[in-house]
Image (cartoon, helix red, strand yellow):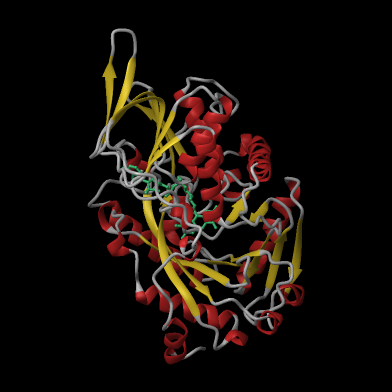
Amino acid sequence: MMTDPLVARALAEARPVVFWLDRPEHPEPAPPLSADLEADLVVVGGGFTGLWTAVTAAEADPGRSIVVLEADTVAFGASGRNGGFCDASLTHGLENGIAHWPDEIDTLIRLGNENLHGLLDVVARHSIDCSPEPTGALDVAVAPWQTESLAKSAVVHEAHGRHVTLLDAAATRAEVDSPTYLGGLWHHDGVVMLDPARLAWGLLRVAKSLGVRFFENTPARSIEAVQGTESTTVRIRTDGGSVGARNAVVATNAFRPQVRRIRRFVVPVYDHVLVTEPLTGNRLATIGWSNRQGLSDVGSQFHYYRLTPDDRILWGGWDALYHFGNRVDPTVEHSPSTSRLLATHFFETFPQLEGVAFTHRWSGPIGTTSRFTCAWGTSHRGRVAWSAGYTGLGVGASRFGARVALDLVDGQETERTGLEMVRRSPFPFPPEPLRWPAIQLTRRAIQRSDRRGGRRGPWLTMLDRFGIGFDS
Ligand SMILES: Cc1cc2nc3c(=O)[nH]c(=O)nc-3n(C[C@H](O)[C@H](O)[C@H](O)COP(=O)(O)OP(=O)(O)OC[C@H]3O[C@@H](n4cnc5c(N)ncnc54)[C@H](O)[C@@H]3O)c2cc1C
């Protein structure tokens, strides 16, 4: 066990800055909106959901005039702050998908595969330099009960056509060497590691080249339906001007939404991340990791970690912090105790990396639903659609979410809109003041369950029965 002074030294120079966004190639922000404009489609939010909405709509109909309003700068939210695990799953993992939609799981798997291929096709066609690495992922067991759950998971994945290999402790350590590993499940397909900020900036470039107009540092303040003589339109007001449009897509995910209904279904959960300095070849050799998979341990509270393109380790997860009243604001972003806990776990996992320093620490709001997957809806007489709540797996799924939102707002019935996953809303979270205690109770029950060999206990069993939960 690492002592505090060593953890403190490792964190001493860690800047509270997002590693992915801390680059000289960060694009210059577009000027804020300062006039009243008209468009065909207005998108609120410049993360992956908003960017995919804009790119998809512009590619499908080059004549459509599209405006994106972003409160800060493109990729400021979760899209610029995540681990960069780009997963084919639309359902926050296969088991969660089977639990909620057993009858349509094979369709969801196919649509998820098509979505990942479609995403990579856009990356290749437009030469987006987001370093996609088709490494797959390695789930590791760090407690005896987790080896059993990996064995069960292997059977389920194989039954649904996924290419997986169950590894014992020695084989897992031959891939990535940690004394904490007791077994592993290597998912060879369906997961690509990428650089999320460069993906977002690449999509920004593509969208602009297709004629999409961006206004950054432009928070949308209100959305109104405007009844005309022949049809309804929407008008989105900002501090410096407004945009009138036939349709709008709201892509604000975990942030305070202008469509109130989203708050019933989506809670913002802060997830924390550390990034090390680049590892030298010798250092990296002490852990192996030559196949560069994305790693996660498999408790209910878990870490996810990966190598960055320049051989740093990005190490995140564990605590999922909810702040009263769905609070999302920079003042809650930094939690020194969470950074210390993460660093302690890091050195417990890789004691051979003692002496490695962290250079960056940050957190970001994950939009979580009670079913751990995206939710959709319409408002303002069908003129506005929204897509939010991918929980911790939205890098890939946000492209699918954007396509569903476009189908909805364009009034198109497609295979996507026919899905039960799309038609049914998740179980709503209770409003405050009940939301906060309910989430804290669930967090404590999750921690207890991990300590007791995965036994769920009465509260989690009751939530499981209703198909609801809380996750990051
Ligand atoms: C720390 C962390 C790690 C993660 N790791 C992974 C991972 O490895 N793999 C994975 O698949 N997923 C991961 N996720 C989740 C993933 O990042 C998200 O699901 C995804 O980025 C959501 O994209 P989005 O566009 O819907 O939301 P966001 O990227 O949050 O974008 C919402 C945007 O809306 C803007 N906005 C808010 N309010 C307004 C307003 N009123 N007007 C205008 N604009 C507004 C915000 O500024 C923001 O830019 C992680 C998330 C976090 C926070």
Quadrant for residue 306, please give it.
bottom right
- The residue lying toward the viewer, choosing from 47 and 453, is 47
Picture layout, residue 243 above or below residue 271: above
Residue 14 percent location from the top left of the image: 43, 77
Residue in the foreground of this view, choosing between 10 and 170: 10
Q: Work out whether residue 283 or residue 1 is closer to the camera in this orientation and state it.
A: 283
User: In the rendered view, does 73 fall on the left or right side of 157?
Assistant: left
Left or right, residue 168 beside residue 375: right
Image position, residue 394 (x, y; %)? 52, 48
Q: Is residue 282 visible?
A: yes
Q: Residue at x 44, y 57 (%)?
A: 460
Q: Position of residue 121 (x, y in %)?
A: 68, 41
At a point 65% along the width and 47% down the height, the residue shown is 127
State the residue at coordinates (31%, 55%): 328
Q: Is residue 435 left or right of residue 201?
A: left
- The correct choice, above or below, for 92 with respect to 348 in the image is above
Residue 134, how many percent across, how many down?
A: 71, 55
Disc tally is 0
Viewer can see residue 374? no
**Which quadrant holds residue 442?**
bottom left
Closer to the camera in the image, 324 or 113? 113
Residue for point 46% across, 72% down: 360
